[in-house]
Amino acid sequence: MPSTRHSSLASPRIGVVGATGAVGTVTLELLAERGYTGVRAFASARSAGRRLGDLVVEEATPKVFAAGDVDLWLFSVGTSASRELVPEAVAGGAVCIDKSAAFRLTEGVPLVVPEVNGERAAEHEGIVANPNCCTIPLTCVLKPLHDAAGLRRVRVATYQAVSGAGAQRMEQLRSTPAGEQDLGVADSSWSFDGEEFDEESKLRGETRKILELPDLPISATCVRVPVLVGHAEAVWIETEEPLGAERARELLAAAPSVRIEECPTPGMAAGRDEVLVGRIREDRSVENGLALFVVCDNLRKGAALNAIQIAELLLARRALAA
């Protein structure tokens, strides 16, 4: 467990690891918007010395993590890097909020969407996991529907923006002629086990963990599409009790961080903090069926903002020290 040495929780010392990446840069922007000072930017050796506004990027090294002069680390790096670096940061006395898949399904590590299961954040032992960028908006929508009528089954097809694969893929899309852009393909970074991609199994496992429904039947198909920002999800739900489209719309309109739009699009979601949901209608092919369409800025609520909201939960509950 980490030690309890840290500065005033009112002014936490925050380190952002992976600061030069697509999510890292948005994280820094949001921290600045929210008035946080004492923020430091970290990345690999090749990015050390680069300037990001008023910040100079520092190299993320074991010595840095052991120094104990950071209260909270926000990690936006790959899974293998997180597995190596996050335990070092925890050993240095800090709490880590990790965006990778490294610890999401690890027993004892809270996997948190503040609007859905925020109370779990304080149960950490140094690490809180930030869910997948499609899991976050999906659970924001499923939670109020489950509370009202119970979930029997969920099917989802995701259409994921290239920013979810990093800044380099964004630049690749910008430089590729429109007629040559791939549509509806699995991302090359996703691993395939012969039946499904890990992106699909992650969506299922994480949703079950967050909603605390370990046996919930969930079927997912995930593809990458030539959109810069904004993940979209077509969702089909079966509930235990009758709900109806109008009641579902009322529940979602009242849900935190959810906004009703008649026909949401990735362009509408880009730069916004809410999860947009629309096309809410009854699916008459099954008993108690609903169909809806969900869109979210995957760099903001789907990643950086959710992590910051977790941090703010911990600060509010004075739960930075494990």
Image: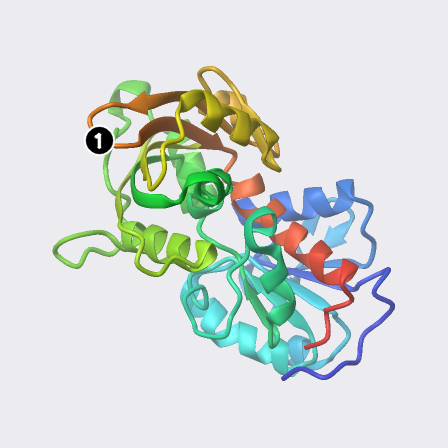
Direction top: furthest residue: 262
From the viewer's side, name the closer residue of 97 and 239. 239
Q: Quadrant of the N terminus?
A: bottom right
Where in the figure is residue 24, as x and y percent of width and height? 59, 50
Q: Position of residue 150 (x, y in %)?
A: 40, 44
* Left/right of residue 281 with respect to residue 267 in the rendered view: left
Give the residue number, with chain letter if any, for mark 1.
286
Q: Please tell me which residue lies in front, 52 or 154.
A: 154
Q: Quadrant of residue 181?
A: top left
Query: What is the residue that sits farthest to the front in this orientation?
Result: 241
Q: Secondary structure at mark 1?
A: loop
| Kind of residue at disc 1 | Val
Tell me if residue 122 comes above or below residue 201 in the rendering.
below
Q: Position of residue 307 (x, y in %)?
A: 61, 53
Q: Residue 198's quadrant in the figure? A: bottom left
Q: Residue at x 54, y 49 (%)?
A: 21
- How crowded is the residue under tag 1: few (<14 C-alpha within 10 Å), some, or many (20+)? few
Q: Quadrant of residue 215?
A: bottom left
